[in-house]
């Protein structure tokens, strides 16, 4: 698992950012739990920018066999080991013409087994299925930043229940997952006769080892869901959210209203509470390229908002512990953002220097104006730092806007 994370993070730092609109997908997925295997037919929209380049690269599990790649503009395809993420393959699709004015559709048919012992946290067993980007089970654009949205139709017997981001419907052995927000991958969890608890639109699905933890996760998650809706829900309410709480390997992650928690990494109750609030807050932050130098806003706003929730519930002392972690995490980082430096925001920025900058901005603006800024950011499609700085000037004056711009650039005077 460590090798996987290092490979992915290395790619995130070297891949170029590509701005593109959300593309659509349609997938027919057949799960074979007794064989730890799957087969799928995915039809994926390919943006014009790739057509202009003549080809597109899609990550896919190295153990999967690609049966066919077809489409009206497809000339050929090849499957090879990825140089960006060597433990994955890339399906390289070449197009017959680079002079396209509309997007193309490509259909990929593939199948294979998931290595349940690979420590990436994905598995297919006779009673559980857990799939995410960590096993590269689904074709993912190799830039790690092309947003996708669509439907997965799953063949799985009717005694299974499927959980996933967006909307899930089931009719006997046919299950349909319709995503409602763009992401870079497709994630889902399915189980026979799952254990779950629910309250007020918040659901926790858990294994037997997490029955006690599930009660706290439900309470904290519901608090976060209600609080975020209270603050930002008049614009776009989040009616429900779910947590999959399992003792498993691999990282925790969130996709929209779907959060998958590795219970071995839960930490303290305060840490878990903040994590849940952070991920739920992301349902109001606009999708932006994770490669962009503006990406710091998405993570730093969610980090700051969730830390202030910790302060509200657990007190000033716990908030200051988080601030101390921000300072420690940001050591050695020179700046948050510069208009002339198009680098990807680092972990030290997103979860350290960025929220510290927001904390300093609140001190400068005052609580009322800063609260207005937070609300504006969360309910509007803000993906560029320049727009944030302009809004600060509107709420205050050009002096504070220039001060904040300089602060982001590394001038702490």
Image (spheres, grey):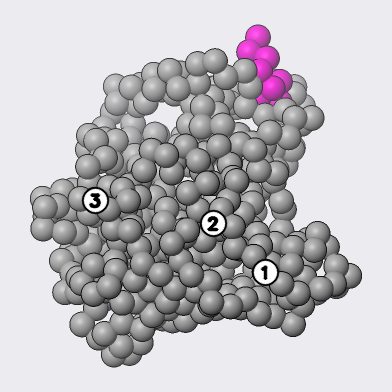
Q: Position of residue 273 (x, y in %)?
A: 29, 42
CA gap, disc 3 and disc 2: 25 Å
The numbered mark at residue 98 is none
Q: Position of residue 360 (x, y in %)?
A: 55, 22
Disc with the residue nearer the chain's start (3 vs 2): 2
* Quadrant assignment, res 405: top right
How packed mark 2 is, by other alpha carbons closer than 10 Å (few <14, some 14-19, many 20 or more), is many
* Image x and y of residue 175, in percent: 36, 82
Residue depicted at 67% across the width and 69% down the height: 77
Q: Is residue 323 left or right of residue 365?
A: left
Per the image, the residue denoted by label 1 is: 77
- Picture residue at 18% right of the left edge, 64% below the top: 197
Give the residue number, with chain letter if any, for mark 3: 248
Decide which of tag 2 and tag 1 comes sooner along the chain.
Answer: 1
Residue 362 visible in the picture: no
Dot 1: element: strand
For image coordinates 33% across by 22% down, the residue present is 321
The answer to which image quadrant residue 269 occupies is: top left
Secondary structure at badge 3 equals loop
229 relative to 48, above or below: above
**Residue beneath label 2, please?**
89
Question: Is there any visible trace of residue 36 in the rendered image?
Answer: yes
Q: Residues within 10 Å of mark 1 (few under 14, many from 20)?
A: some
Q: Mark 3 packing: few (<14 Cα in 10 Å), some, or many (20+)?
A: some
Q: Which residues are magenta?
A: 403-413
SS class of the residue under badge 2? strand
Q: Do labels 3 and 1 touch, CB within 8 Å?
A: no
- Magenta-colored stretch includes residue 204: no
């Amino acid at each position: 698992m460590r090798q996987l994370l290092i490979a992915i993070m290395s790619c995130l730092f070297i891949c170029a950012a590509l701005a593109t609109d959300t593309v659509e997908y349609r997938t027919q997925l057949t799960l074979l739990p007794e064989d730890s295997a799957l087969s799928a037919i995915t039809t994926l929209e390919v943006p014009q920018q790739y057509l202009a380049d003549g080809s597109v690269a899609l990550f896919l599990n190295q153990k999967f066999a690609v049966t066919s790649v077809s489409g009206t503009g497809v000339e050929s395809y090849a499957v090879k080991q990825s140089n960006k993420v060597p433990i994955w393959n890339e399906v390289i699709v070449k197009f017959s013409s680079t002079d396209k004015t509309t997007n193309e559709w490509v259909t990929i048919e593939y199948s294979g087994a998931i290595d349940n012992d690979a420590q990436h946290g994905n598995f297919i067993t006779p009673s559980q299925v857990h799939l995410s980007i960590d096993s590269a089970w689904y074709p993912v654009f190799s830039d790690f930043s092309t947003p996708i949205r669509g439907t997965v139709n799953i063949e799985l017997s009717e005694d299974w229940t499927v959980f996933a981001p967006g909307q899930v419907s089931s009719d006997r052995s046919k299950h349909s997952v319709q995503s409602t927000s763009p992401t870079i991958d497709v994630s889902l969890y399915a189980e026979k006769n799952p254990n779950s608890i629910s309250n007020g639109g918040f659901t926790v699905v858990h294994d037997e080892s997490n029955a006690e933890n599930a009660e706290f996760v439900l309470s904290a998650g519901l608090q976060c869901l209600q609080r975020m809706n209270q603050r930002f829900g008049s614009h776009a309410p989040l009616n429900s959210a779910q947590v999959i709480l399992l003792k498993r390997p691999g990282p925790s992650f969130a996709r929209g209203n779907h959060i998958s928690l590795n219970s071995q990494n839960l930490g303290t109750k305060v840490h878990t509470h903040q994590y849940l609030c952070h991920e739920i807050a992301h349902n109001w932050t606009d999708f932006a390229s994770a490669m962009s130098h503006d990406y710091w806003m998405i993570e730093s706003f969610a980090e700051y908002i969730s830390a202030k929730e910790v302060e509200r519930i657990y007190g000033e002392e716990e908030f200051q512990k988080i601030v101390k972690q921000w300072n420690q995490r940001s050591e050695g980082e020179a700046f948050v953002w510069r208009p002339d430096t198009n680098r990807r925001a680092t972990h030290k920025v997103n979860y350290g220097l960025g929220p510290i900058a927001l904390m300093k901005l609140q001190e400068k603006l005052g609580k009322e104006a800063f609260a207005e800024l937070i609300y504006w950011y969360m309910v509007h499609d803000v993906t560029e730092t320049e727009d944030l700085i302009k809004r600060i000037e509107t709420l205050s004056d050009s002096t504070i806007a220039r001060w904040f711009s300089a602060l982001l650039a590394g001038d702490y005077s």
